[in-house]
Image (tube, helix red, strand yellow):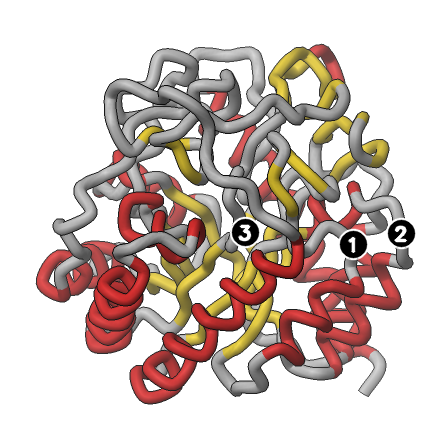
Amino acid sequence: MKLGLGLYRHQLNDEHFRFAAQAGCEALVIHLVDYFKQGDNNQPGDQPTGALDGWGRAGDPNQLWEQEYLEDVVRRAKAHGLEIAAIENFDPAHWSDVLLDGPRKAEQLENIKTMIRCIGAAGIPCMGYNFSIAGVAGRTKANYARGEAEAVGMEGPVDEPIADGMIWNMRLRDQLGPGTIPPCTPEQLWSRLQDFLEAVLPVAEESGVVMAAHPDDPPMPTIRSTPRLVYQPQFYQKLIDLVPSSANKLEYCLGSLAEMTEGDLYEYTESYAQQQKIGYVHFRNVRGKVPHYRETFVDDGEIDMLRILRILKRNNFQGVLIPDHAPQMSCDAPWHAGMAFALGYMRSALQIVERETTDSK
């Protein structure tokens, strides 16, 4: 197993690469979507949460991720001893009609195939995605964590309809509305996911790229009056079985899974690890279940993180674990301090599990 760090687009620079290397990371999971573009609710030093008008403005639907840019990021990270293990999340502008079954769906699927080929050619082995209309929406931010550290949580259901011109919690245009996006049933959303997987998985296989699906965040049956797909742990199995492929895997978010109201996290981790279906892991701890939960420091939640590592090790998981986000600490560099704490805990825990395995032989 490899220790990694997740970086937003504006953090893909030598300063943050050095920070990752100093913390003992071997890999990075990078975001190419600019969640903070024209956004009024979030600061780039933190993770995005927020208001009903979304995080910010989505990108240009016709500006695809180019192989040259991807290769440059890979090269610059490699100079610090780091590999790019995955890209996380498509730009909402690149697949809005895939999610909504709109008129540009076929065109956008072809564009996604083109980007997957570029990702593979650049030597990046995984693409994480979250097939959701509302996206990561409905979360709140407050002093939820130990010592009144700022962290993310949820204060109850959020089902206000989504304005037309918005998808995946980002704006496709400056002015939203009039009206709201078209209604969608759970069956229709599963059908759209199947269309997506049937289109892209063969290309992903050919390109050496794993498609890793994130569970719903927050894992509610509906968010903003739209259905969700993976809001209970068993629905991950439905996703895996929907279109069987060696490239069809999971972006295994422990925090989101622990927030779900059904199932045993350790049993499901055992099952998906045995199937070799875990692409990479979001190593995050929480307290509570939806619609009321709090993210915590990695050592202070309800998940037995060492038990999770032992399950992964026993099933020969060799992928990357990242603290996808962490509570902000009270200092001049709250993001860096929060991540350093999480990475230090993770590095130590990985060493413990590795020594346990060696001692048992």
- Residue 312 at x, y = what percent? 72, 71
Answer above or below: position of 37 versus 346. Answer: above
Q: Nearer the viewer, residue 96 or 90?
A: 96
Q: Along the line of sight, which residue is nearer the eye, 113 or 122?
A: 113
Q: Nearer the viewer, residue 255 or 162?
A: 162
Which residue is the site of mark 3? 322
User: Left of 275 or right of it: where is 300?
Assistant: right
Residue on which disc 1 sits: 232
Please tell me which residue is depicted at 18% across the width and 56% down the height of the picture: 65
Looking at the picture, which amino acid does disc 3 mark? Ile
Of callouts 3 and 1, the N-terminal one: 1
Asked if marks 2 and 1 touch (Cβ < 8 Å), the reply is: yes
Going from N to C along the chain, the mark reached first, 3 or 2, is: 2
Which of the numbered marks, if any, corresponds to residue 30? none
Q: CA distance from mark 3 to mark 2?
A: 24 Å
Q: Secondary structure at mark 3?
A: strand
Q: Which residue lies under the disc numbered 2?
A: 262
In three-dimensional space, the C-alpha distance between marks 2 and 1, rounded to whole angstroms, equals 6 Å
